Image (spheres, grey):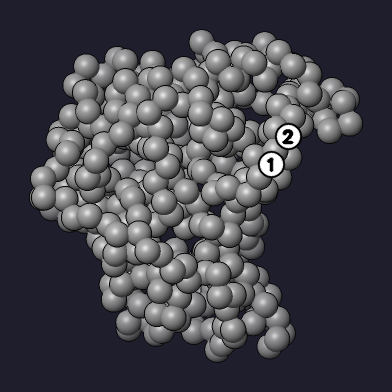
Amino acid sequence: GVVVVMRLLYISRVVETPRPARSIPSQGDFPVDVVVKSDVVVKRATATAWDSRNCVVIGLAVGYPVSHFRQFIGSLRATGYPGHIIIGIGENPPPGVVEYLTKRNVVVKTVKFTKCTFTNYTTNTGQLSSFNQKQKCAVGYPDYKIQWGRFPLAADWLRDCKGCTEGVMLSDVRDAYFQRDPFAAVVTPHPVMVFEEHPMLTTEYWLVGYIVKQCKGINLGKRPMLCSGSTMGTRDGILGYIEAMRKEFDAWLSVEKCRFDIIGDDQSIHDYLFYEGKLPGAVMIPYRTGSIHIVGGPADKIFRAAIEDAKKIGKDEGWVNNQRFYGTDDKWEQWLDPKFNLTDENGYITNFDGTPSPQIHQFDRFGRPFERWLNRKVQGWNDKLDSA
């Protein structure tokens, strides 16, 4: 099948044959900005604002192996989430995918691909780009590269779901998993909820700052980076959000300087629309306080710091990927040094109030040292579901 890369990868990783895990001797001094002090008071919910039975999680995951679904779907169902899940897959999915999704009560949507009809993407020098031949487009939305096309596809699937009357989450699949029911954790629902990334990432980053400046002539300044990979809201709110995104897609395609030959500019548009007040009812959820914890910034720093420490003893990134960040194999749940103030005693990544963050997004930035913890958890979650 065609593997759709839904987000820009901020790091690359060397994958080697697994060897017995050992502890990395030292990780040295760590940049202080990883530990964020917050005065945000998280209110405890006395009643669930949304009934999760009427909520839905929607994602596109074309070409992914069943292991990705065991992680994403298995972790979500293991939280006790009883609601709807809609996942788009390709026409020829890898072995076991349809069977697994069916077993976990997932509505499967088959995404068919067709020849892309918009082929005027240009490079930063104004030349026609090879991206025009490489892009993938879905039937029904041939003008949109699939990273854009996933939005109207999600709207179609949401409209088809008559029981999806309350909360909606649009989510990346490959680099996300769940630790709590994301809808039960929402105290006050809003039509659209957009989520801050770590404060070290702002709209000055090229993916938003440069792209928006070139297309719109607007300098967004230094504002919190908002992730377009995971968004929540009400049914009507999310439909309105997708319509606003789609209108902006069309606007960008109509202007030569806005035709970027990249796969991540849905985030550029997402941030532009919010900060320019073009998403009615949208509310920004501060970093590490809501249902979605985008952990990519700190994760990448922790991984990079481990690589730098490894270089001091003559090792490289591949070696780091076969070690532990912290602790010992018999205490495998303690995978990260408590000094980072990022996990609890069981290894769950937490919000500032100490509770496990409902969804973790961009966890892959930690590299393979974290995946050992996650893989054992995923196995346990699925075993528990299978024995229920």
Q: Position of residue 188 (x, y in %)?
A: 24, 41
352, above or below 307, in the image? above
Assess whether mark 1 and mark 2 are in contact (beta carbons under 8 angstroms). Answer: yes
Q: Left or right: where does residue 347 sit relative to residue 216?
A: left
Q: Residue at x 87, y 26 (%)?
A: 126
Q: Where is residue 229 in the image (x, y as percent from the top left)?
A: 48, 39
Residue 221 appears anywhere in the view: yes
Please state which of residues 380 and 252 is positioned toward the viewer in this rendering: 252
Helix, strand or loop at label 2? It is: helix
Q: Label for residue 209? A: 1
**Residue on which the image places disc 2:** 213
Give the alpha-carbon distance from disc 2 to disc 1, as whole Å: 6 Å
Q: Which residue is drawn at 29% across and 39% down?
A: 100
Crowding at dot 1, Cα within 10 Å, few <14 / some 14-19 / many 20+, comes out as: many
Please state which of residues 160 and 43 is positioned toward the viewer in this rendering: 43
| Amino acid at dot 1 | Gly
Q: Position of residue 380 (x, y in %)?
A: 25, 61
Q: Which residue is drawn at 31% across and 34% down?
A: 190
Crowding at dot 2, Cα within 10 Å, few <14 / some 14-19 / many 20+, comes out as: some
Q: Left or right: where does residue 280 sit relative to residue 255?
A: left
Helix, strand or loop at label 1? It is: helix
Q: Residue at x 55, y 15 (%)?
A: 247
The quadrant in which residue 161 appears is top left
Q: Label for residue 260? A: none
